[in-house]
Image: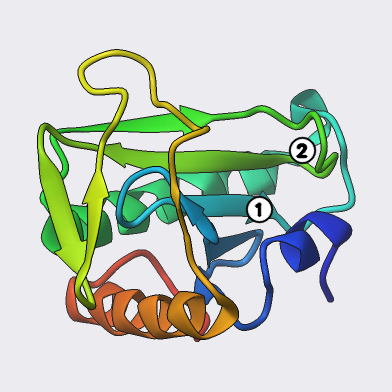
Amino acid sequence: MTNPTAAAFGYPRTLVAETRYWLVLIRPKQPTLGSLALVCKEPVQAFAHLSQNAFSDLKVATEGIEAMLSSAVAYERINYLMLMMVDRDVHFHVIPRYDGERGDEGVTFADAGWPGPPDLKTSVDLDADQAARLAKRLRDLWRDVGGGTSRL
């Protein structure tokens, strides 16, 4: 089962990992390399309406994300943004932050907002195939670093 927010972020093609209550997806617009959407699978549109189980499972998801992204992009900071202005289901934009640039498949990803807030208007727009390939590489890395209790 999916929700409109997961579909908007390209699920299932962009799926990196899945815990009991959360989907970890590639964010097709990448302000920095490895930017993700962390989407709750419960049918709620307010953070306070999550079940206790979803809140507990959020720890599993974030531990996996941070281990995977640390290995993948060597981020210096990480931002979890809960914006929910367009996509209404509970979700976070996960933006790994770093000074300088990172590269993937010959594409350069600079953190245009460093060291301030992330610049979400400056991004590398991945096409569906690029997003799927990045998702697969991160999915493999998630498994290698023991990221959370992935259901994949």
Residue 53 position within the rendered picture, expressed as x and y whole percent measured from the top left: 66, 48
Badge 2 marks a residue whose secondary structure is: loop
Packing grade of label 1 (10 A; few <14, some 14-19, many >=20) is many
At horizontal 52% and vertical 45% (from top left) the residue drawn is 58
Residue 47 position within the rendered picture, expressed as x and y whole percent measured from the top left: 74, 29
Number of numbered discs: 2
Inspect the image, locate mark 1, and give the three-letter code of the amino acid beneath it: Val
Is residue 27 shown left or right of residue 74?
right
Which color mode does the image show?
rainbow
* Residue designated by label 1: 39
Residue 46 sits in which quadrant? top right
Of the pair 17 and 127, the residue shown nearer to us: 127
The image shows residue 53, relative to residue 68, as above or below, that is above
At horizontal 58% and vertical 39% (from top left) the residue drawn is 92
Of the pair 28 and 137, the residue shown nearer to us: 28
* Residue designated by label 2: 50
Is residue 123 shown left or right of residue 21?
left
Inspect the image, locate mark 2, and give the three-letter code of the amino acid beneath it: Leu
Is residue 146 shown left or right of residue 7?
left
Of the pair 59 and 129, the residue shown nearer to us: 129
In primary-sequence order, the first of circles 1 and 2 is 1
- Looking at the image, which residue sits at the far top? 116
**Residue mark closest to the camera, 1 vs 2:** 1
